[in-house]
Image (cartoon, coloured by chain):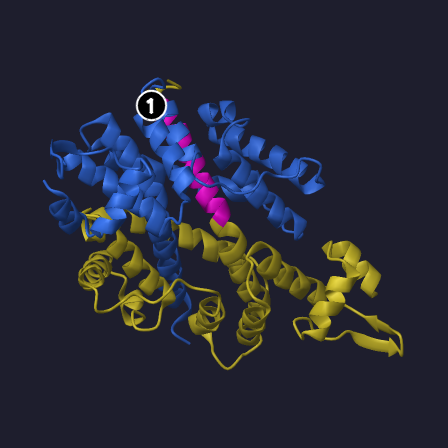
Chain colours: A blue, B yellow
């Protein structure tokens, strides 16, 4: 397809597509003559991914470039290919390891992973941003005097594991590994706000069931 | 307790507590003489709530004041007391009702609520920020060409409903309605990042189980 059709099908203005091409976020089309290039379905997919990261996820351009570098890098296999791409997305600040609540939170999260039998996650604690976010979140509860530890977290972790099983089942419905990694990034950008909204709506449904409209 | 002890037990500096008192975010203590006031457990609880909203949730002071106004307002009963306080927290921008993807998303979310039998949530669609966030999120998927509708969302909604049941069970463990509403706000501020982190960690656990470390 030509640039105009790529723009029409993606809903992204041609000037923006040209900007993405200049910035190297989108690979160049196949040049058919000096003024015209031809784009394919892979360009459309990549364009949607870039658009989601920049416009919905507000991911900085340099970070988008880094994430895409991991998507296109086949040197890592299996879960690490996925991990490298997702971990390049913006993350929460590092926990302050000198803080007493952070230290207590590390212990609670370690106890949680033992209790859940998440043997793989235990091996990722030194490199996983998700692990660090969890420690920061648990430390915030403890700093406010709330006893929020392995016991309280375990039933939530179980539900989040079932959510992750759904995510990966949906991802595996895509035929190629490239599409699967792209879908995982879109999920991290687009599906997290959807889950948060579903969670709040479910709280409203459940609280009106229990307490009425008031 | 005196101001110094309130500061020690909450971990909030005395200068910050004085600022919250001046801003009316914390009710004044009981004046024991011209220079000394006495604070109780209720001050400590309120202080923790204010601190969580401002420091962890980055909620603006004027919004904190509005949320607390709803917490302290007993004119609304049942789920609406909870709803008014939670709905005063910062929310996503309104959906653009002229947008074709937003219109399609409204239909998909309506189909989802029918399918789930969330009869109460259906009555809240015109006022609930969670409903609007969900429409915005579903529209973002559709704009990128992803067929993300009632069928894909239903299993996620079911898991989020189970999460909400846990939230309300935890909330009901607190004896008074005031404490319950406060805990619900803390949950919205502190537990959402914890759930997001648990979700990502569960994805890492599940993907390494399926695909290995690579």
State the residue position of label 1. Answer: A73
Q: Residue at x 48, y 73 (%)?
A: B81
Residue extending farthest front: A34
Q: Position of residue B151 (x, y in %)?
A: 19, 49
Which residue is located at x 76 percent, y 55 percent? B9
Q: Residues within 10 Å of mark 1 (few under 14, many from 20)?
A: few
* Residue A141, x across and y down, in percent: 60, 49
In the image, which residues are magenta?
B193-209
Hey, which residue is sitting farthest bottom in the picture? B75
Q: Where is residue B20 in the image (x, y as percent from the top left)?
A: 69, 69
Residue at 37%, 17% in the rendered image = B214
- Asked if residue B3 is positioned above or below residue B190 in the image, the reply reads below
Q: In which quadrant will I find the N terminus of chain B?
A: bottom right
| Residue A155 in view | no
Q: What secondary structure is the stretch in magenta mostly built from?
A: helix
Q: Nearer the viewer, residue A172 or B182?
A: A172
Question: Is A199 above or below relative to A108?
Answer: below
Secondary structure type for disc 1: loop
Front one among A189 and B36: A189
Residue B206 among those drawn in magenta: yes
User: Would residue B102 be counted in the magenta stretch?
Assistant: no
């Amino acid at each position: 397809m030509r640039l105009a059709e790529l723009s029409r099908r993606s809903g992204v203005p041609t000037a923006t597509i040209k900007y993405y091409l200049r910035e190297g976020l989108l690979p160049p089309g196949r040049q058919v003559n000096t003024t015209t290039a031809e784009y394919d379905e892979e360009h459309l997919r990549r364009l949607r991914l870039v658009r989601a990261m920049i416009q919905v996820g507000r991911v900085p351009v340099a970070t988008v470039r880094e994430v895409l570098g991991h998507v296109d890098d086949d040197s890592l296999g299996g879960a690490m290919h996925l991990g490298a791409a997702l971990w390049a997305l913006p993350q929460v600040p590092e926990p302050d390891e000198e803080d007493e609540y952070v230290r207590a939170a590390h212990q609670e999260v370690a106890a949680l992973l033992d209790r859940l039998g998440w043997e793989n996650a235990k091996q990722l604690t030194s490199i996983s941003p998700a692990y660090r976010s969890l420690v920061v979140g648990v430390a915030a509860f403890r700093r406010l005097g709330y006893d929020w530890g392995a016991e309280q977290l375990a039933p939530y972790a179980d539900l989040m594991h079932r959510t992750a099983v759904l995510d990966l089942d949906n991802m595996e419905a895509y035929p190629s590994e490239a599409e699967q990694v792209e879908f995982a990034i879109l999920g991290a950008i687009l599906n997290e706000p959807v889950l948060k909204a579903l969670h709040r709506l479910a709280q409203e449904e459940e609280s009106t069931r229990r307490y009425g409209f008031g």
